[in-house]
Image (cartoon, rainbow, N blue to C red):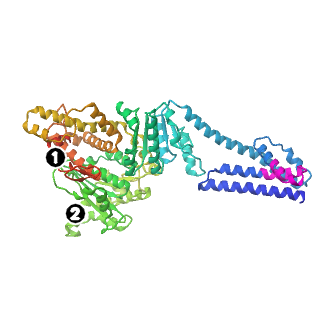
Amino acid sequence: MNGHVFFAAFAALSLLVGVGCLVHALYLFKTGKRAKRVLSSIQIFTIGVFFSVLLIFIPICYTNNALTDSHRYIRPFLLAVHNSFRVFILDGDFDTVTNAVAGQNTGLYIVFTSYAAFLYVLAPLMTFSNVLMLFKNVMGEVRYRFRVFKKHYIMSELNEKSIALANSIRKTDERAVIVFADVFEHDDEENYELMNAARDINAICLKRDVTHLNIIKKKGDVEIFLIGENESENVSQAVQLTTELNEKNKKHNVKIFVFSTKPSAAYTIDSVEYEKLLEHAVEHNCDDNCFKLRRVDEVQHLIWDIIPKMKLYDIAHRSKEDRLSVLIVGFGQYGIEFFKTLLWYFQFEGYTLEITIIDNKGTNENDYISKKINRDFPDVLKFNRCKTEGEAKYDIVTFSGVDVDSADFDNLILRGGTSIEHESNNDADKAVIERIRRINLAFVALGDDDENIEMSIHLRMLFDRLNEINNKQAKQMEWRKEPVEIFSIVYDERKSGIIRDEKCSAGNSCGLRNHNDTPYHIHFVGGLSSQFDYSCIYDAKLEDSAYKQHNSWVDIEQKVHNEWLESGDSDKITEVKRYDWGFEYELTPEAQRSSRAKFEKYEYYRISSMAKELYKRELDNQEILRVITKCSKKEGRSTCECENCMKRKRSEHMRWNAYTMTLGYVRGSYRADRAKVHNKLCAWDDLSKIDKHKN
């Protein structure tokens, strides 16, 4: 082969390989496609540069060595590889190139040496880039290993949720070590933004899985958040970490938070065996330095966080009938959780709760909403509109199969603005019309941010028409806070940041306005930063108060038992002897530890006690309710029988009935928790005297 053709062919092939790898790397970087690949764009381009340099040296080494036929191809190739490596480590001799093509024509000499010079500069840059990436990973490991005594917050995955949670933690604890596990750099915009967000809070990013971080060597407190998108993996990681910590039993100041909205996860976590860790926790009164394992239902946490801020009893009091009439649009995860919480949270003697639910699933004949409620909470609709005193009071109406984007939805709402005399003589129609007119709170949760925003604006328009203001110009109106409060779920923080004022919270109107600068008075809740705020995920004060509620159940039994036996009242003494106490008359240290262990290990006791504490806070914080439930008895209200105390006890039983039904329990003559049958699910008058005092 002619010499200049030989060199020109390999130079062209080298250029083709380099450009091809560059185009492929840029394509992957631009599109962000991951497709189970392990190489990043810069690594793919580095491989392309290496083969380009190799193809430049193959003709050089071939012509520079007088070889026998047996070594004509092997030795030049190996020498070409050797020289290519030297170029990447700044040890390449450029004279090797110039001497090899010195005898070629001038055009080829200029092109070939210029291209080779470019590769001589580019190759070391690629070496430096890859070493920098390696150094960055090593530095992360060094920072993690040597920060032994500081408090660690470890996220199992780098995603939007974990970044929001980490930002919340950094605001409250500037010195804490924040770690993201299982982090791999990918060439896409989302990963780039997440990595930058992690660097902004000085977090450590590690490639290792959270189960391989050897947290037992950390002397400071460790909080692990299993917050991956795969909820099943979160639970598996929790089981593995807890089992290992329990077996070694050397590190106790660890908290594990498992993010999962699946009810099955609660049973799995409750069944994890960690007796050694639990025994240590109970011995130390389960203080902040003890092991804790918690499931985090982000939907429930959000609803429980915002519902006290809605000031429901204030809204009902403004109706002059002490009535709260709620419209729920969308019966998905958020809609169901709001329905469940509302059902028990708004239970107080003398107040009325109406709930109207609209969803596009099902039809009038195939009522999806009712079937869903009957399946998950069988007794809720069975005791709908119950008139018995001392029972939970609520009035539920469902509309399945209503397309919220159609005129059917509008017609349903606007019927509340139709005169009853002209609408129909049908009693059912009249009831619907009156019901729509009474709505004073709407909750929108359609499962999509844009749909929720649009529906909230649409509802405001419909409610304005119901208020007979549609014929007035907005600028001529004296705007005030609307009688119908609208709450809407908006998850994307970037959207909610625009439509919400900086000072906006779940209890304040937000900044969405029309072209006349007229506010819509819509509360947008559920943003990423509020949903994954650390205080929302773990409220230590609420847990402590909830434990007091949990423990007081037995304390009150003991107190009533002793007081009634010593009272000399024959009826009370008979009641004490008849009642099945289920515990020793004295609350022994063993019974106290058993009570604490149950609260610590089982979600049922914690969540139920927290629900009771939230309700208690509402009664204590609401001035309207505080006045009518105030007790002047200094030694406590547990055995007091004044009217205010009895009203509060009756209301608590109504709340407990509603709450227990939302757990799926049904009424029965016995109690069987696996069958979800409870004999205390009954009217107030059917309770024993002692059970009445326990409320």
Q: Position of residue 152 (x, y in %)?
A: 49, 35
Residue 348: say if magenta: no
Q: How busy is the neighbourhood of tag 1: few (under 14 within 10 Å), some, or many (20 plus)?
A: some
| Picture disc at residue 294 | none
Q: Position of residue 222 (x, y in %)?
A: 46, 35
Q: Is the stretch drawn in magenta largely helix, strand or loop? A: helix
Q: Residue furthest right?
A: 103
Position of the C terminus by quadrant: top left
Q: In terms of image quadrants, where is residue 626?
A: top left
Which element carries disc 1, helix, strand or loop? loop
| Picture disc at residue 431 | 2
Q: Please provide the residue range marked out in magenta.
A: 53-79
Residue type, label 1: Leu
Q: Name the foreground residue: 88 vs 254.
A: 254
Position of the N terminus by quadrant: bottom right
Residue type, label 2: Ala
Q: Marks 2 and 1, Cα distance to the nearest angstrom?
A: 34 Å
Q: Position of residue 167 (x, y in %)?
A: 48, 41
Marks 2, 1: nearer the viewer = 1
First in residue order: circle 2 vs circle 1: 2
Q: Which residue is mark 1?
A: 687
- Residue 389 versus residue 253 in the image, above or below: below
Which element carries disc 2, helix, strand or loop? helix
- Would you say residue 282 is visible in this rendering? yes
Q: Name the foreground residue: 504 vs 248.
A: 248
Q: Position of residue 631 (x, y in %)?
A: 18, 36
Q: Name the foreground residue: 631 vs 392.
A: 392
Residue 59: say if magenta: yes
